[in-house]
Image (cartoon, grey):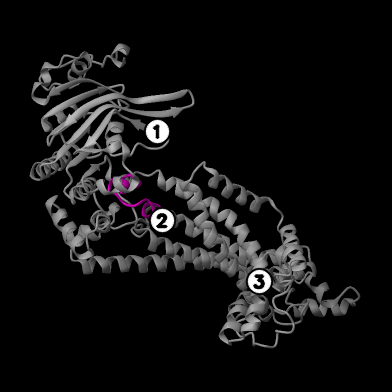
């Protein structure tokens, strides 16, 4: 049985001109593997991730023909059942630690909160949190534990975020552009840490990014999204065999170090692909 | 770096903040003294006339003029006044013929007591109402809170006061009427602090306490309602802002219960600007609400200042203004310091 099954997922937001569908019938299954979702801004990749966690922001609404996580139908969960799953069995790393960490709460307290929410005692939670900070290769866990988010660099903040989301050893992690807000040099470090923990804990990963090359080097499979739809599904190793013109366009846009291209290629957007 | 030095560094930063705040306060207070003094000289009121009266001879007038020190240069007058102020001497009231400091010490506790009970009511109801409205944005409860707030903004306080007295005192007889305490209870306790609720409670004069309470509850609810209108509206908008932040999504991803997200995570962030809102509301109440104090015959600072102003008793007006200014400065300093406690980000600013 697959870890996650998604069939015909749709996310709709009401607007003044009537409902606007930002995710339009996305289907895929996920085992304990790494799945990349690639697409440009507004393609619906982030909303797909949030819908899986049941966190479609109001007044939006998500529907699906099938949305099951390890045999549990996610569509009919109560708020309490959702809370039992989130943070414990599924979690999400978000883009920018500057905004995704609570600014007035020390980092350690935020880490402990996950474990405390799911029933751990204070001392055990503290110990586990410190271990986890160590696992994301933070040199002085005690000090970072006491620090406030603004006292950390972006890279450190994102490590804390990863620690927080993996501390309860979930089965599914959604990483929504986890390195987009970081410097390029730090990106690799953070990815390496994420990669190591994901393989160690053997969880399913959905890696959302606009960076096709990053995704293909990091994932087993790639979904390419355009205007709320999956236009192509590929093995990461067979990226160069992409059939869809949009994927080819994305690949062509990547700068090549050994050629001098002028003018730079632009991305074609055919209205027909959206249908 | 060990945790101990880390903590020590934070302590040092806090101390530096305290020192710089005190410096700011000293400068602000000096400015306040200058402005207050100049207002006293600029207003078209002849302080001599209010002492000697209309029918004094020129010789009497000149003598009083000299006695008041008005023939000295302005700078020297300011210096003399400044020295006296620092000794707690604001001069003598022409109206009550007592030292102004004594007058203020007598009327200020009445205002302090009323303002404190009011701000407690306004905060205790205003913050939860604002939070509730923000969580249920656009729903019925949000509309109700907004209408309640709007009425608090727009209804004239003296009218609300009179209607309150008419209904609860005259018709229903639930509470006591104007004044701070009925005369029959007035000698059951000694007003040591001037805060009658505190005095009666400490001296165990419970019947008098009940009477004082039934006097204060209506004006305090009324003023509390006015600050509630402001506090709930600000709370609502701060909370809406916080609830839209990304760290709230993080908390939901972590599986944190909704009540904790609202009342701990979001409100803790909203509390930072709320401190200023509550402090300023409190400062406003401490000025003494002239209309409320008049309607309820409350012998407070507002009434005292109005009386003094109407009788051209400039020393009293200046003394009162100075006290109010000092309260404003003090409360601002207090909320600044509270900021640094609530929000670690403000601690590291040099």
Disc 3 designates what residue? B216
Query: In terms of secondary structure, where does tag 1 sit?
Result: loop
Quarter the N terminus of chain B occupies: bottom left
Crowd band around label 2 with a 10 angstrom C-alpha radius: few (<14), some (14–19), many (20+): some
Q: CA distance from mark 3 to mark 2?
A: 31 Å
Q: How far is mark 1 from mark 2, CA to CA? A: 24 Å
Task: Please state the total of marks drawn on the protein image.
Answer: 3
Q: Is residue B133 above or below residue A44?
A: below
Q: Which residue is mark 2?
A: B263
Query: Which residue, given by chain and number where applicable, does mark 1 sit on?
Result: A60
Quadrant in the picture for the C terminus of chain B: bottom left
* Between discs 3 and 2, the one toward the N terminus: 3
Q: Residues within 10 Å of mark 1 (few under 14, many from 20)?
A: some
Return the x and y of residue A184 as percentages of the image width and height: 18, 37
Quadrant hosting residue B313:
bottom right
Is A113 placed left or right of A30 in the picture?
right
Element type where label 2 sits in the image: helix
Residue in view at x 43 percent, y 25 percent:
A19
Q: Chain of mark 3?
A: B
User: From which residue to which does the magenta span run?
Assistant: B248-263
In this picture, residue A13 sits left or right of residue A99 = right
In the visual, does B239 lie left or right of B35? left
Camera sees residue A15: yes
The residue lying at 28 percent from left, 58 percent from top is: A106
């Amino acid at each position: 049985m697959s870890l996650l099954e998604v069939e015909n997922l749709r996310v709709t937001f009401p607007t003044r001109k009537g409902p606007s569908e930002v995710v339009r019938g996305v289907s895929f299954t996920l085992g304990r593997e790494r799945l990349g979702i690639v697409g440009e801004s507004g393609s619906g990749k982030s909303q797909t991730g949030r819908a899986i966690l049941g966190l479609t922001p109001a007044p939006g609404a998500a529907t699906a023909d099938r949305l099951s996580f390890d045999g549990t139908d996610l569509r009919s969960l109560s708020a309490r059942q959702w809370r039992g799953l989130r943070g414990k069995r599924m979690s999400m790393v978000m883009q920018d630690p500057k905004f995704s960490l609570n600014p007035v709460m020390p980092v350690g307290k935020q880490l402990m909160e996950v474990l405390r929410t799911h029933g751990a005692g204070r001392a055990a939670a503290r110990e586990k949190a410190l271990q986890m900070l160590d696992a994301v290769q933070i040199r002085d866990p005690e000090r970072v534990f006491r620090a406030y988010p603004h006292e950390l660099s972006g890279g450190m903040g994102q490590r804390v975020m990863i620690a927080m989301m993996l501390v309860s050893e979930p089965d599914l992690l959604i990483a929504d552009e986890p390195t987009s807000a970081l410097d390029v040099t730090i990106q690799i470090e953070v990815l390496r840490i994420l990669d190591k923990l994901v393989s160690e804990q053997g969880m399913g990963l959905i890696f959302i990014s606009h960076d096709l090359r990053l995704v293909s080097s990091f994932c087993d499979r790639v979904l390419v999204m355009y205007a709320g739809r999956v236009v192509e599904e590929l093995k990461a190793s067979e990226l160069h065999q992409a059939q869809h013109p949009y994927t080819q366009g994305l690949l062509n846009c990547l700068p090549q170090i050994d050629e001098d291209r002028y003018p730079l290629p632009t991305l074609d957007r055919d209205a027909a692909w959206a249908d | 770096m060990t945790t101990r030095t880390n903590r020590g560094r934070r302590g040092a930063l806090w101390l530096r903040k305290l020192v710089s705040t005190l410096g700011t306060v000293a400068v602000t207070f000096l400015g306040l003294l200058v402005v207050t003094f100049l207002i006293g000289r600029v207003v078209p009121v002849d302080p001599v006339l209010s002492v000697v009266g209309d029918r004094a001879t020129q010789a009497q007038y000149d003598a009083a003029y000299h006695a008041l020190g008005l023939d000295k240069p302005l700078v020297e007058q300011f210096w003399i006044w400044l020295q006296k102020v620092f000794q707690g001497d604001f001069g003598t009231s022409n109206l009550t013929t007592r030292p102004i400091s004594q007058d203020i010490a007598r009327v200020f506790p009445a205002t302090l007591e009323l303002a404190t009970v009011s701000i407690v009511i306004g905060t205790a109801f205003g913050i939860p109402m604002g939070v509730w409205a923000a969580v249920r944005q656009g729903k019925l409860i949000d509309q109700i809170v907004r209408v309640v707030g709007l009425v608090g903004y727009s209804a004239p306080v003296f009218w609300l006061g009179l209607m309150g007295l008419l209904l609860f005192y005259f018709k229903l007889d639930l509470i006591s009427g104007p004044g701070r305490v009925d005369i029959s209870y007035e000698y059951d306790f000694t007003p040591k602090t001037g805060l009658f609720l505190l005095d009666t409670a400490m001296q165990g004069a419970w019947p008098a306490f009940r009477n004082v309470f039934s006097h204060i509850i209506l004006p305090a609810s009324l003023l509390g309602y006015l600050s509630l209108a402001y506090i709930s509206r600000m709370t609502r908008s701060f909370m809406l802002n916080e609830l839209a932040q990304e760290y709230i999504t993080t908390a939901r991803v972590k599986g944190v219960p909704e009540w904790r997200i609202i009342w701990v995570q979001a409100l803790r962030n909203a509390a930072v600007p709320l401190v200023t809102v509550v402090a300023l509301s409190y400062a406003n109440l401490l000025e003494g609400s002239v209309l409320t104090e008049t309607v309820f015959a409350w012998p407070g600072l507002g009434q005292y200042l109005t009386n003094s102003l109407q009788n051209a008793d400039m020393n009293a007006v200046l003394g009162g203004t100075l006290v109010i200014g000092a309260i404003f400065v003090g409360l601002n300093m207090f909320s600044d310091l509270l900021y640094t406690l609530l929000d670690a980000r403000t601690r590291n600013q040099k």
